[in-house]
Amino acid sequence: MEGVGSWHEKLKDRIPEDLGREVDIFETQMELRRRGEVDERLFAETRLRRGVYGQRYDNGQRHDGTRTQELAFRDHPTKGPETFWDAPGMVRIKIPYGKMTAEQVDVLAELSEDYSDSISHVTTRQDIQLHFVHIEDTPDMMRRLAAVGITTREACGNSVRNVTACHLAGVCKTETFDVTPYAEALKEFLLGHPDVQAFGRKMKPAFSGCAHEACGLVNMHDVGYIAVAREVDGKVERGFEFFVGGGLGAIPHPAQLLTDFVTEEELLPLTQAVCRVFARLGEKENRGRARIKFLVAKLGIEEFRKLVFEERETLPHDPRWTAYLEDVEAYREEPVRKGVALINGALTPAFRAWHDTNVRAQRQDDYAVVTVKCPLGDLTADQMRSLAEIAREFTGDTLRLTVEQNIVLRWVSQEDLPRLHAALDAVDLATPGAETIADLTACPGTDTCKLGIAASRGLVAELSNHVGHLNGETDPAIKALRIKASGCFNSCGQHQISDIGFYGISRKKGGRLVPHFQVVLGGKWVENGGSFGMATLAIPSKNIPEVVKRVTGRFVEEREPDETFTAFIGRLGKVEVKRFLQDLSDIPAFEEDPSYYTDWGDPRVFTMEDYGEGECAGEIVPLVEFGLQASEREVFEAQLYFDSGELEQAKAMAYKAMLTAAQALVKTEFHDITAEPDQIVTEFRARFHETKRFHDKFAGAKFANYLFLAHDVGGNGGRPEQARDRVQEAQLFIEAAYKCYERIGTAGATA
């Protein structure tokens, strides 16, 4: 590997002292762990805070929906790993607000070849991930990244994650002002800050230049900032609407307004105060409720706001709070070529199709932003190198990653667009359809994620074949829709804020597992991820393409003038959506159609044996299926109550649904269990929670606590605004009950 040896001569003297020292320390910690002198639990968090993840190992194969690709890279094991040290893992590389230089792109290409599978994966939070990396190689990777100004520090773990921002910041026609220097200041201030080292879980920040576009998706972030301006004494003063407590995951929470105007001078200290309150009062034991959204919900925004501003008053002064302001006005990107208007001459149909979807005019005259569409968020090493050369020629160091897993080139002279298109096309990077229904998003899913249940990448690859023609001739009403898929409920694919979203689950038919996706409709992408979609019903994975066809077709046929998809789904309602999709939930017997029992892009019979801890002993009586089905019906009714504004009834019915599911499991070994809530909860706690039989990698312990918390407040207790959470918690509890049932098994069950 020439790249591994040659980089030292080119870049070794450019490693910043502080970053170099951090890597040295990590390398020492690795050695101590190898000798058994560091506890594994401590080392796990250590490596996570350096961006080093364990990943799922699938016999050296990557599934992309069209083929099963044998991975070929050095030291590839020939059998499954026995320990973390034997296993190829994943390295997450922080790219703050997505900004990259051409040199950084070159280095990422080299690293993907030298240590990974020659693929750089763009994430939904403007990171780059390299998969199938051996932990022994990570210190060298980190040094090579540090030499070009990139760190993996706090890319994972219980820390402040990558600071994201709108990829159009500074060039958008409708932004209030460029948020880039503020995102940079926050990144620098919080990286390694002592006040952010004692969180119970992660914290994700985001910046947006306006309120109406998707931009930074502030509504789904732990802390978020939307640029605003006001006039004070005849002068325009910059500031931000400051939001806290947003998040997707298993239970999505919309962010709440902490203050409608935080000044430039107060941006950093107020954020520091939020971090200190979260570190002090946030959950530490129950990781399932350790995000800041749960603390805000528990305290209420008024009390949380009071605590934050009290904390702010006690903070010792830090000169860094305002030192960055000296550079804000001076910050600007410089184009490498003069902006000249495009002359509409002999332009090819391919160019026009690409220009229609992938090119956006900047607010600066005669310049454009070009989106490079990256299917599944993947670019090969050769494509990365070509992209770096293209950037050097046309735009300079103005590349940015997007939260839709693409890359944009900013400051393209419009005159250069035909030549740029030809250069991109030569390396298969000129696919049209960016930011349309054909631009689908997926998390890694079962390809590499240990928590993946269903193949989100495989599904998206398949759906791309179905919607790929929707770039030009399709009805404009559906052209702008977003489709996003996650491999599980954790929403790494951001399915909850898409028009049409899916997350992976599983069901059983005739004793066999069948991959499914829960269908989520009507999320709002615009207005910074303005609202979350409605979970409807579970559909076998192989029927999902038909779901998309039916839903989009009905929207085209029945929408009212200027009606958005979100409004259309709301008008249709959950009952009607479930009715017209219900037949797609049917599963043929294995002998009739075995394809239903495989996942997209993977010909093997679907199994979850490699995800969990194995099946528990015990008998399951057929009555359990009736009980679980009843619980699904009850949670559906709870959702209907919520939709009609009957919040107390929604909470009560959601609680009842959890009791029904818990009772169904208890009946597998205690047939005489009554419907008395105290007895159900007591027996469930003793038989399934305390024995950990309900628990698995998919957070069964967290879901058990949903029942206990609801029981403690009397089922319909708590504030009215908690009804939505109670309904969604019930849905997740029932999913966990299904998984517990699947693990226990039904062989030999008696009535």
Image (tube, rainbow, N blue to C red):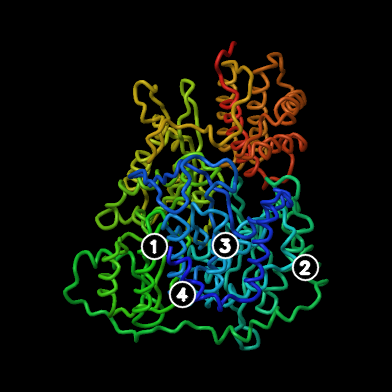
Residue at x 46% of width, y 69% of height: 107
Image coordinates of residue 703 in percent, x first then y, are 66, 38
Q: Mark 3 points at which residue?
A: 218
The numbered mark at residue 720 is none
Q: Which of marks 3 and 2 is nearer the N terminus?
A: 3
Q: Does residue 34 lie above or below 8 as drawn?
A: above
- The amino acid at mark 4 is Thr
Taking the image as shown, residue 90 lies to the left or right of residue 278, namely: left
Kind of residue at disc 1: Ala
Q: Which mark is in front, 3 or 4?
A: 4
Q: Is residue 558 visible?
A: no
Dot 3 or dot 1: first in sequence order is 3
Q: Name the residue under label 1.
A: 381
Kind of residue sitting beneath label 3: Val
Q: How far apart are marks 2 and 1 (CA)?
A: 48 Å
49 sits left or right of 64 in the view: right
Residue 309 tag number: 2
Left or right, 90 with reference to 602: right
Residue kind at label 2, given as amino acid type: Phe
* Residue 313 can be seen, yes or no: yes
Q: How far apart are marks 3 and 4 (CA)?
A: 26 Å
